[in-house]
Amino acid sequence: MQPNTEFDFADKTSGYWALVILPLALPTVYTYEIPLHLLPIATVGSRAEVSFGKNKKYAGIIKAIVTDAPTYKTKPLLNILDDAPLIYPQQLQLWQWLSDYYMCTEGEVMAAALPANFKLSSETVLLYNTDFGDDFSALGDEEYLIAEALQLKLELSITEVQQIMDATHVYPTIKKLIDKQVCFIREELNEKYKIKKENYVLLHPQYANEQQLAPLLNEWKGAHKQMELLLAYLHLSKTEGDVVQSTLLKKAQATTAQLKGLVEKHILVVESRSVDRIKSLPKDIFIDFELSTAQQLALAEVQQVFTQKSVCLLHGVTGSGKTQLYIKLMEQYFNAGQQVLYLLPEIALTAQIIRRLQKHFGGNITIYHSKFNNQERIELWNKIRTGEVKIVLGARSALFLPFKNLGLVLVDEEHDASYKQQDPAPRYNARDAAIYYGSLFNAKILLGSATPSLETYYNAQQQKYGLVTLSERFGGIQLPAIEIINTTQVVQKGKVMISPQLKEAIQKTVEADKQVILFQNRRGYNPYIICGTCGYLPQCTHCDVSLTLHKYSNKMHCHYCASIYPKLVTCPACGTNTWLEKNFGTEKIEEQLENDFTHFKIARMDVDSVRGKTAHDNLIQLFEQQRLDILVGTQMVVKGLDFDKVGLVGILDADGLLSFADFRANERAFQLMEQVSGRAGRKEAQGKVMIQAVNVKHPILALVQQHNYEQFFKIEIEKRKEFFYPPFSRVVMLTLKHKDKTIVDGAANRLALLLSQDLKEFITGPAAPIVGRLRNLYLMEIMIKLPKEAGKSGVYRKVIRNHINLLHSETTFKNVQVVVDVDPV
Ligand SMILES: Nc1ncnc2c1ncn2[C@@H]1O[C@H](COP(=O)(O)OP(=O)(O)OP(=O)(O)O)[C@@H](O)[C@H]1O
Ligand SMILES: [Zn+2]
């Protein structure tokens, strides 16, 4: 399937060929001949400029160099763009693994893995860097030509660059211009996130703790004005959290020179920050706390596990101090000169953790973020590649960084579904990929959670992973007491669900100078029905799963086995017809609270209320500083947040959580409720949680009430086994998409038929998903539950791939998109 025959370089042949990955969804790598003059600089892991197709050019990555002459004529490499490899062999291995396991192409992985500025193609558009200025003296002749044109037109396509230079091989010149920051590559994503920079003032890490400040203040030797400025700073940081330089100078009526004085004395630090980027903090480490006895024990156990196994699960209840344990462990690997990767489910949600870690690791911590601008990403990329950067904190895309000597990977909140990328390919789970990537370095991987995923806990039970348990909260505080409140009556009245009991508890909590978090799941758009008289939830007769009302069919569907039922008129449990469709959201609740509690400060945290990352972090800081009484939110309030003063947590609608319609429904419900409960009573005194439900007898509620993860696991794993779900099988979900409903239905049936030739007993469906049409495309799903036989998964994947290709070879179905999702969450 190799393109091309038009070149003939036979006279200058070097006898070497390069296998090149192109950043496209192509099924294979392509072979190019290495011309003699490029042979000395062609290295595996470097970018090469190649032509592809009629007249397209790409910067591809050299995956391998071979001496076996291909049986067909090949095009030559046009240029080598990098002096040193951009990536290490481990990354090439990771890419290959991801493309095999998640059934996508290496080109798709490459496109996801490389920062935009490393990706050049004929479609690339260059953007002039308006900060560059007018000084072109450092530019070569050709660079000068392009820079001038860019300055005038602000953006140029590669074709335009080719015309200006009157040359076809323009990539090396473009690369130099990017290196010199004359221009960037345009990427849609970055335009949306223009990162504003601001100067922030912070305490020097040596004064991170106020006790260290007292002697300094008592024996103040500097200018009086400086002391005033410092006091103003302390005041501001207490009341506002992050302190912006301009605000501080205004408040203190001080000058930049006075501030500079304090900076020179290493009392304050000024830092130019783009939202959550940490830059010029001193590279000192301050680990100024001791682990409790239980924590010390757990740490020792983890270390013991790591002498025998590379993966360990730390199952620690909420507030047990897992983060503190990570810190100690990170310090150890850092001191041994190894790199540490700290993965978080969503970077935007965890500005708090960043602040916590920054206190201890200062400038040694680096955050990596797919939303950073191009230049920042490249800078970081290179520092990680050379090993200069030792500790990286990031969401899933940080996995693609070119680590040099990775020693430790921490996967915090390992159960979190955000570790799975949904769209586009590669649809990978960063936790699982991290385990593979880590193994290439012989690194240790610590998975942490208060509510581990069933897969992980099962692996620990099977002794594939080590298991360390921390079952008490730090400071000996009891886990919160959980009360379950029957809200049938409230529901009947069709009111926003704040029961009188909860209302009273909110009142009392805030009056006692404590705070309240109220949680409402955001899947409100997904209506479900419940009997308003007896709380009966319609369930599938074949499965232990509640049914979902579909918008299009107006019928009830089971997503477990794909059965379809007519919409119920009469409740089979009590004979009434009082069905309620429930979907009130956080906004309505906020409004209700404002009516009920006119004197309390109330805020809402969900995707609508927090546009952008700063808004979110500001809200968290306001709450941290107790300038808010009540926070109402969606999943966002669940993720690993650590507040000192939360006395009460309310889960407004447990039925909503328990009616998710797939095999992970119970797992997700348990995790969410346990996690959100875990925000209560973390410091000082035991907290209280109120869970409102109509279906108060649901067994999951009792398990949450007892904080009994082990029992939950025992029950749930049995069901998974019975119905052959993960971790006993591996799910591959195929989603077919087409704008014509009949075509997509036809294609789904056809594909299911094809697949059943080889995989009959493993197929469920086809069935329409909850949302049967998305962006004008109709959807159909086929679920395949594959057995986990060693060595067989490659065969299964090939079979699936072949049948999809067969489907596409039929004229009627050739335009039906088939999305393959391995291990969907
Ligand atoms: N050894 C310690 N010394 C001082 N403070 C500690 C210690 N251990 C825990 N804490 C404090 O207790 C609180 C809870 O700890 P942490 O946030 O690490 O818990 P966690 O296990 O990560 O909880 P979650 O799973 O709910 O996120 C934090 O404020 C933390 O600073
Ligand atoms: Zn009923």
Image (cartoon, grey):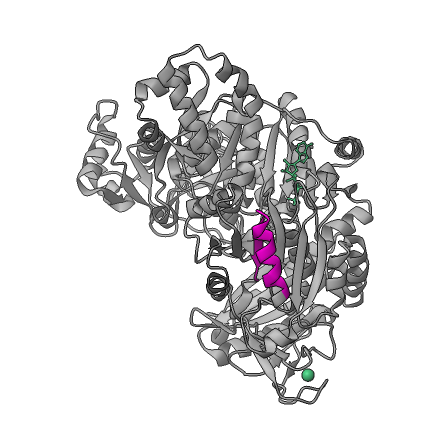
Q: In this view, does 475 lie above or below 779?
A: above
Q: Which residue lies furthest to the left in this view?
A: 152
- Please tell me which residue is depicted at 60% across the width and 72% down the height of the picture: 751
- Which of the 4 image quarters holds residue 649? bottom right
**Residue 197 in the image, given as x and y percentages of width and height:** 35, 35
Please indicate whether residue 63 sits to the left or right of residue 5 in the image. Answer: right
In the displayed structure, 790 sits above or below 384; it is: below
Residue ranking furthest to the top = 221
Relative depth, front residue between 512 and 70:
512
User: Does residue 160 appear anywhere in the picture?
Assistant: yes
x, y (%) of residue 223? 37, 13
On screen, 42 above or below 262? below
Instruction: Say if 247 sits above or below 782 in the image.
Output: above
Q: Where is residue 274 in the image (x, y as percent from the top left)?
A: 39, 36
Q: Is residue 513 magenta?
A: yes
Q: Indicate the quadrant of ligand 1 in the picture.
A: top right
In the rendered view, does 570 fall on the left or right side of 283? right
Region rendered in magenta: 501-520
Quadrant in which the C terminus appears: bottom right
Q: Which percent across, then down, holds residue 772? A: 52, 74
Q: Which of 407 and 320 is in front in this view?
A: 320
Question: In front here: 663 or 347?
Answer: 347
Q: Based on the displayed image, in which of its 4 quarters is residue 819 positioned?
A: bottom right
Q: Which residue is drawn at 55% across and 29% down?
A: 359
- Count every numbered label the image shows and give the total: 0
- Residue 390 appears in view: no
Is residue 101 covered in magenta? no
